[in-house]
Image: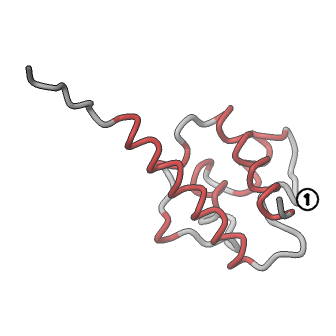
Amino acid sequence: MSVLVDNVAKAVELLDKDYPNWFLAIDTENLWMDSPQQCILGQLYGGYCKGTRRLLGEDYTAPLGWPFEGSLPTENKDEWLKVIAARREAFLKQSAPTKKEHV
């Protein structure tokens, strides 16, 4: 697993515990990883620093999903978009009504 994928996985774990179905609240069209308001935490918590304080109890800038040291914002965003798309797909499958067979 790459460092980027590992960092996103750690961040997702924190989000899952604090903000169930967080992936439904993200506006992927306006996701901008360099923006403290439009990044993942900005969209969910009203600001990057508010989000890190909520999840970690302090302002945090080390590589735990926001931001990543050594990765470009576009790589970061691409990985998050993959995770969000997979989560949304799984959510829709889980939420879809099951067809009953007619006898």
Q: Residue at x 71, y 76 (%)?
A: 75
* Callout 1 secondary element: loop
Front-lying residue, 71 or 99: 99
Assign the C terminus to one quadrant of the image. Answer: top left
Count up the numbered dots.
1
Residue at image mark 1: 62
Q: Residues within 10 Å of mark 1 (few under 14, many from 20)?
A: few
Q: Is residue 26 above or below residue 90?
A: below
Q: Nearer the viewer, residue 71 or 6?
A: 6
Image quadrant of residue 40? bottom right
Residue 93: percent from the left, percent from the top? 38, 41
Considering every residue shown, the one lying at the far top of the view is 103
Report the residue at 84% width, 54% height from top: 64
19 is higher (above) or lower (below) than 103:
below
Q: How is the image coloured?
A: secondary structure
Three-letter residue code for mark 1: Ala
Q: Picture quarter containing residue 8?
A: bottom right
User: In this rendering, would 91 be left or right of 81?
Assistant: left
The x, y position of residue 84, in whole percent, is 55, 55
